[in-house]
């Protein structure tokens, strides 16, 4: 449901999938690769300061992002996105910026790291409280299908969590035929009471014929290619990764926003990408 990324699309650039150069944040350690997979890129966050600019960029602004969200997304601001003690921290804060009452960050790999198929493993601890809406998700690198970027070109939600429904993790796929605004999205949930107290692995395995999402070692969502065309399955082009915390919004704000909870953080231990051997 983390939708309407049209505002973020204007600056899209094309990058070759799996053609990633090593940098200060990349630690290609094949010992971390599951059987049958080969690691092609990782950010282990083994540095301090701003997120590594060779891997991460920012979506910026406070337009509501198509979901009536209340935060202003900042760029290169340590208060909202930083790496310390081996952890990436995305922090949403109660503070005014532009016409918004909250600030946060939305990190993207668009134009830097983009992939077609593979295994994506993100180890994270989530914020807590009514009004929080963290997400780990993916959007198409370029507009390849239809006359609109979204939902024609697809969206893959690896993890969404809304604070008024604590512990329920949602995974979904959206396309022109199956998306949330018309109530046809493909989606499922899994429950874990400690998602805001402990780290869990949120894992996407993306194949030509199916998309599967796991929490730790438990498969809880599958979306299958029904071979009826791009309207149902636009997931055959490169996508990029997004990490963010939204505040309020059409879904995250359904029960209001608790102003006593801020600041709130999503902490990310690592991001790892693999391809099939």
Image (tube, rainbow, N blue to C red):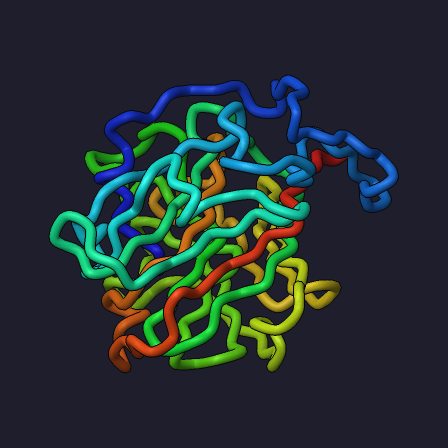
Q: Residue at x 47, y 40 (%)?
A: 235
Q: Quadrant of the N terminus?
A: bottom left
Q: Is residue 69 left or right of residue 118?
A: left
Q: Which residue is drawn at 30% across and 46% down?
A: 73
As rendered, which of 127 and 251 lies closer to the eye?
Answer: 127
Q: Which residue is drawn at 62% across and 21% down?
A: 20
| Position of residue 12 measured from the top left corner of the image (x, y, whole percent) | 33, 26
Q: In which image quadrant can residue 258 be found?
A: bottom left
| Position of residue 193 measured from the top left corner of the image (x, y, whole percent) | 60, 81
As rendered, which of 245 and 206 lies closer to the eye?
Answer: 245
Q: Is residue 3 left or right of residue 199?
A: left
Q: In which quarter of the image is the C terminus?
A: top right
Q: Is residue 170 left or right of residue 84?
A: left
Whether residue 35 is visible:
yes
Whether residue 121 is visible:
no
- Name, please, the residue furthest toward the left: 99
In the image, residue 37 sits, relative to residue 16, either above or below, namely below
| Position of residue 274 measured from the top left corner of the image (x, y, whole percent) | 70, 37
Q: Which residue is drawn at 47% across and 73% down?
A: 128
In the image, residue 49 sits, relative to residue 195, either above or below, namely above
Report the label total: 0
């Amino acid at each position: 449901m983390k939708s309407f990324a049209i505002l973020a699309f204007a600056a899209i650039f094309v990058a070759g999938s799996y053609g990633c150069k090593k940098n200060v944040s990349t630690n290609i350690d094949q010992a971390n690769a599951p059987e049958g997979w080969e690691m092609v890129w990782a950010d282990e966050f083994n540095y301090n300061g701003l997120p590594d600019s060779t891997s991460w960029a920012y979506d910026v602004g406070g337009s509501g992002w198509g979901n009536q969200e209340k935060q202003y997304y900042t760029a290169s601001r340590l208060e909202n996105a930083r790496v310390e003690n081996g952890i990436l921290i995305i922090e949403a804060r109660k503070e005014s910026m532009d016409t918004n009452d909250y600030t946060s960050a939305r990190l993207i790999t668009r134009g830097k790291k983009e992939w077609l198929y593979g295994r994506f493993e993100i180890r994270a601890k989530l914020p807590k409280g009514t009004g929080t809406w963290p997400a780990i998700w993916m959007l198409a690198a370029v507009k390849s299908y239809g006359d609109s970027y979204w939902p024609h070109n697809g969206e893959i939600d690896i993890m969404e969590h809304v604070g008024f429904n604590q512990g329920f993790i949602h995974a979904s796929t959206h396309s022109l035929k199956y998306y949330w605004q018309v109530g046809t999205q493909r989606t499922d949930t899994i429950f874990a009471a400690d998602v805001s107290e402990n780290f869990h692995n949120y894992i996407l395995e993306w194949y030509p014929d199916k998309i599967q999402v796991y929490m730790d070692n438990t498969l809880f969502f599958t979306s299958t290619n029904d071979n009826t065309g791009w309207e149902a399955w636009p997931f055959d082009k490169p996508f990029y990764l997004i990490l963010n915390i939204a505040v309020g919004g059409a879904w995250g704000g359904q029960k209001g926003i608790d102003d006593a909870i801020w600041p709130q953080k999503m902490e990310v231990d690592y991001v790892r990408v693999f391809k099939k051997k």
